[in-house]
Image (spheres, rainbow, N blue to C red):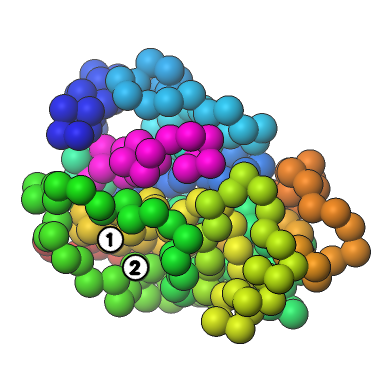
Amino acid sequence: MYTKINEATQYIQTRFEGQIDIAIILGSGLGPLANEIENPVIIDYADIPHFPVSTIPGHDGQLYIGQLSGKTVCAMKGRFHYYEGHDMDIVSLPVRVFSKLNIPFLIVTNACGGIRDDLFPGQITLITDHIGFNAPSVLRGPNLDEFGPRFKDMTEVYSKRLGAIAKEAATKTDISMSEGVYCFFKGPMFETPAEIRALKCIGADMVGMSTVPEAIVARHSGMETLGISLVTNKAAGLGASELNHIEVMEAAKEAEKNLVTLTKEIIENLPEPIAQ
C-alpha cells in the first residue's frame, strides 16, 4: 500500500509542484464545480499509478489542480466506489495521496437519498456525523503508521470548525443548508423501504453509497474534513416514483449553481490549518 501511495503521489508531483490548500471529492452530478477552477492542471485517473478509471455516469475520472477562491485546490471530478468492485484500500487511496501531499483540508460531497421528513430533492445538507455499519472497515489490515494510529478516535470525523464556516457561508450567500447524519450503504442497489425504516429508527437522515470510507481515512490521516450531501431523491418507500440514477443526475444539475456558490464561499474563508 505504501508503494501505491508513494507512486501515485510522485506522479502528481511531476505535474504540479506547489503546495495545495484543500482537496475536494465531487460526487454524482457535482463535477461542474471543477470547471470553476482557474488555469487547471488536468490529470486523467488513467495516467495516475494505481488509480482506477471511474465507470459511473457523472464521474468523469479526472483530477483538477488550480486556483479557486484564492486557494490552490485539488478536485476529484468523480470518485471510486466499493460497489464498482474496488477494495476499500483503493476506494480510499486518493485520500492517502492527499495526505502524503500535505493537504490539510478535505471537502467530500455526495448525492444522497433523503430519509428525514424535511429533506427533499435539491436540499444541501451539512454532514454532522455518519453511520457506517454497512461499510467494510477501511482501516482493516496492517496499520499505516505513517498516517495515523492503530485505533483512531472517530468522535469528530467531520470538523466542527469547518462546519461553522459552512453555515456562515450559507447565511452569507442566502442558500438553504440543513444538517444531518449520513448513512453508508454498499450499493449498487438502492435500499429497500424496510431498510430505510430501520435507518430512520437509528438516527440516519440521509443515505448513500460513498463518503464514509474517505472520511474515515481522512480522519485517520489527520486531515480536517467537511462533508456536504446533496439530497437528490427521497429514499426508498418515501417518494412516489421508482429510484433511478437518472433522477439523481437531474436533481444534482438543478442544485449545481447553489452548491458551486456555497463551496467557493467556504474555500475563500478557510482557516489556518491545525498544527499536527
Residue 157 is labelled as 2
Q: Is residue 51 left or right of residue 154?
A: right
Where's the C terminus, which quadrant? Answer: bottom left
Cα–Cα gap, marks 1 and 2: 6 Å
Q: Are marks 1 and 2 in contact (CB under 8 Å)?
A: yes
Residue toward you, 147 or 135: 135
Q: Is residue 219 above or below residue 140?
A: below
The secondary element bearing badge 2 is classed as loop
Q: Is residue 113 left or right of residue 142?
A: right
Residue toward you, 16 or 160: 160
Residue 87 colored in magenta in the image: yes
Query: Which residue is located at x 37 percent, y 75 percent?
Result: 160
Query: Which residue is located at x 37 percent, y 26 percent?
Result: 51
**Which image quadrant for residue 100?**
top left
| Residue corresponding to mark 1 | 219
Where residue 226 appears, as percent x and y from the top left, is: 42, 62
Q: Which residues are magenta?
A: 81-99
Q: Residue furthest left?
A: 145
**Within 10 angstroms of label 1, few (less than 14), some, or many (20 or more) residues?**
many
Q: Residue furthest right?
A: 240
